[in-house]
Image (cartoon, rainbow, N blue to C red):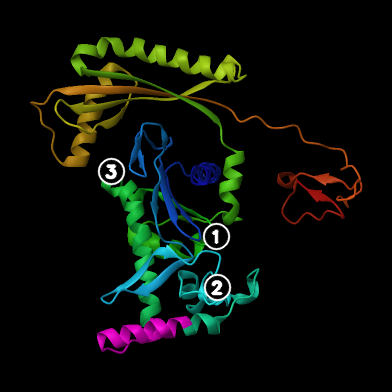
Amino acid sequence: SGPAAGVVGAVQIARRLGFDRILTLDMGGTSTDTARYDGRYDYRFTTRVGGVELHHPSLAIETVAAGGGSICWFDGHRLRVGPESAGAAPGPACYGNGGPLALTDVNLLLGKLDPALMGIPVSRDAARQALHEVRAEVERKTGRKHSEETLLRGFERIANELMAGAIRRISVRRGFDPRSYALVVFGGAGGLHACRIADLLGMRTVVLPYDAGLLSAWGLGHAQTEQLESRQVLLPFEACREKLGGWFAELEERAREALEKQGFGPEEIEVRSRWLHLRFRGQESSLEVPFSTPEAVLPAFRQRYRHLFGHYPEEGVPEVESLKLLAAAPRREAPMQTEGVRQGEEVRVEGCPLIQWDELEPGQIVPGPCLLL
């Protein structure tokens, strides 16, 4: 999916820059997706879609209805941003198609967008007219005067809080401090809100990749093949601690077999992580605990539990809900074509040289015409 591919792309960029703990902010036209990475991807194993509960592994991504097309409006009591979107048609008011005031209009009127640099004509006058209509409604229903700046900053703050709230749900709510992470921002609108969102979360590092609007597509091309295996246990930890090593060995064998069937050699396959889901008997939710040796499990569980809840019930009976093992195989590079493109009716390069983009050096001049790959 696009959201998952964006997380993969963000991780690849972050690794190259030396960051191994990141929170992602993917802001597009209708919604914003956020995720967390701290050396391995964060997964969820149950997802509810349209009232149906799906038991299938997926990246843990939190989505909020805030994007460039989110409609900025007044509900009679307070300013609102979204969840409705102006979409691409009619689009934000600045498109000139009679659309409503949207977050893109707010950013345009705040001076964060330059019409001269945009790929389509946009109108500040149309955006300001839509703002005047909202302003008139606010003043009519509240009986109080408001400046344009007050309304614009109000809509901006609401959008920023919505997106910061999504990041808090995948970090603070689960016991992770966003201040110890870097924020990797992408999507068509992410850069417009990145710094203020980072301020709200106390984050000091923001990474904005080149061509951030294309990062999801780039990430899809850099995704590795992974195999996740699991085993349900539902036994007290002390009753199965001596069996854990053997069970993980079985999971590894199954993962390797599945990847080898996809054409990967045994030497290409790497076990990325092993972990347990533990809980106290009688509890419904469980905590993830990495597995190295049976002796290290309970101390790690105790530390994680105290970190999240502030106490640890010593009289409780820890129970192993399930085991998980993740194995991966490297992404295979397709051979680069070196001959010129064949001449045809729809092709005009006629044998020009093919240049691989990542082989170019900063400032290097390449005589044209040529085709960059």
Q: How many marks?
A: 3
Secondary element type, mark 2: loop
Q: Nearer the viewer, residue 141 or 208?
A: 141
Quarter of the figure with residue 88: bottom right
Q: Alpha-carbon distance for marks 1 and 2?
A: 12 Å
> Considering only vertical position in the picture, is 26 above or below 129?
above
Whether residue 202 is visible here, answered yes or no, is no
Q: Alpha-carbon distance for marks 3 and 2?
A: 35 Å
> Going by the image, does 34 lie left or right of 241?
right
Quarter of the figure with residue 368: bottom right
Q: Name the amino acid, label 1.
A: Gly
Q: Position of residue 343 (x, y in %)?
A: 91, 45
For residue 113, the mark is 2
Residue on which the image places disc 3:
174
Q: Where are the magenta residues, as a range?
A: 130-149
Residue on which the image places disc 1:
188
| Helix, strand or loop: magenta stretch | helix
Q: Position of residue 27 (x, y in %)?
A: 48, 57
Which badge, 3 or 2, comes first in the chain's sequence? Answer: 2
